Amino acid sequence: MHLELIDYAIIALYFVFVVSIGLMLKKKVRTGNDFLMSNRSIPLWITSLAFISANLGAQEVLGMAANGAKYGLYTVHFYWLGAALAMIFLGVYMMPFYYGSKARSVPEYLKLRFDEKTRTFNALTFAGMTVFSSGVSLYALAMLMQVTLGWDFDMSVWLAAGIVLVYIFLGGLTSAVYNEVLQFFLIVLGIAPLVFIGLQKAGGWEGIVQHVDDAKLHVWKGLSSPENNPMGVDAIGMVFGLGFVLAFGYWCTDFLVVQRAMISRNLNDARRTPVIAAIPKVLMPLIVILPGIVLLALQQQFAGFQLPVNAAGETDYNMALPVMLKQLYPSGMLGVGITALIASFMSGMAGNVTAFNTVWTFDIYQSHIRKDASEKHYLYVGKITTVAGIAASVATAYVARGYNSIMDLLQLVFSFVNAPLFATFFLGMFWKRTTGHGAFWGLIAGTLTAAFVHGISVAEGKGGWIVPLTGFYSGTSQAFTIAWIAFLVCLAVTILISLFTAPREEKELEGLVYSLTERIKDTEKRWYKNPLWLGVIVLVITIVFNIIFF
């Protein structure tokens, strides 16, 4: 990819800008709470944009374009089925528990609801997941810089990791949140024109229909059997595996996104944050998925749009968006597009690292190593943990090189961690009889089950490390199946053990369990300040989109 001086200038300006944000916010970071939780002082419009942007990292911008080319319109299920409803549920029903309990993290809520061992297990698995996700973002960024700028992959990894380290180290979570807002606008500015130009070149939507396999241009048609759709998923796997287990497991329990709502100024803002974020979320496929589908049409009409092959001899779908940028953007616009991708990758990495340092400091270090240290001490621990998290992310970046779709890899990781965790939360919040012993052993059983199913199954050459007894059509299909099986096992084990162990006193669970908590009355008459009415509007829009693209 040939970049001019103006393109390099735009990229360099972005690097200077993100570091400057950290320098400006450095003076406001005096305590561990400032560094790790922004002192719960972030306004609604910032938390809402940060909420969606925290998920708008490398895995979404690069990975969803890859899945658009690989699976077609079925990829929009990650938004219309696998995001909107769960985000509404989080805002309307779950944020009162998180925010009202004054928990500083999702694992800390588990401590309040269950016990210390449940909290610790979740903190450790979540820490591992965030490091892995951060590594995926770093890998994607380094790959992009290698392809677009011709930089060495290793040098790109260390350069990107160093810049992220600097601005988090200086400004903590607040620095990451403000950079996420910047990232959102950069992505819209940098990628939306690419969709418009690509559609024009492909002949509009008529050109898409004419040159793309019809099997990739539907959302629900073909889900009667895995053989009938390119994703290799049936309706049960899609609706229950993605739409319920993975969607609610991610959006309702993943501290990376929940943290953005928890740092709001008040409860109403915390509840509205994910619901407001759901509005641009349902429209995001236009920017992140459509480029991959447009690429398929352009491949049939013009030279230069073919995807490369990775080291394993497979089509590298992760290169869908970089190929589009290379072929369609002129100088100047190319710099903006590349900067948008760099911003998304770095923000995605920063979001994971800030979630990691918060959980490690509060839920592992403070809980088990030093409980009564000063706020300044926890500030130092948070900064040291940030360095460790960045180093671990560098290591995992190299693991991600073995996958031809980073979204498949991430869904697999989520199926191990978030799927059983959602079963624990679902029972804990809505069944007062759930016990700490049941939650702990249920989580362990669900996680081990996920590992076992992965060990006896194979998809695209991945898995089968125990003995390959069954196969899946795609990595996505495998992840969806692992998710709902792990969820059900965790659910069953938790219920069984809870029935044979003593529950906590009801007075200890007030504010933590739905039936023992005073209902929130949404008295706000203005619809845009009422999270329930906002949620209904988003839900109607989502249903309409599903009908149109059936």
Image (cartoon, rainbow, N blue to C red):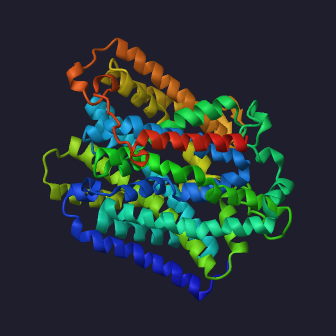
- In the image, 288 versus 423, the foreground residue is 288
Q: Is residue 3 above or below residue 142?
A: below
Viewer can see residue 323:
no
> Considering depth in this image, is 353 or 197 the residue closer to the camera?
197
Residue 349 in percent (x, y) is at 45, 59
Q: Is residue 91 above or below residue 50?
A: above
Numbered disc total: 0
Q: Nearer the viewer, residue 300 or 166?
A: 300
- Give the residue displayed 35% in from the left and 36% down from the top: 121
Tell which of 138 and 515 is nearer to you: 515
Side of 411 where 172 appears, left or right:
left
Q: Quick one: quadrant of the N terminus? A: bottom right
Residue 530 in the image: state x and y as whole percent. 40, 43
Residue farthest along the top direction in this orientation? 500
In this view of the protein, can residue 61 be seen by the observer?
A: yes
> What residue is drawn where x is 52% and y is 38%?
85
Give above or below for 218 relative to 161.
Answer: above
- Image spot of residue 383 (x, y percent): 28, 61
Residue drawn at x 58%, y 59% as measured from the top left:
61
Which residue is depicted at the point 28% across and 28% down? 518
Question: Is residue 162 shown left or right of residue 510?
Answer: right
**Which residue is situated farthest in the bottom direction here?**
5
Q: Quadrant of the C terminus?
A: top right
Q: Is residue 22 above or below residue 96?
A: below
Q: Is residue 186 left or right of residue 289?
A: left
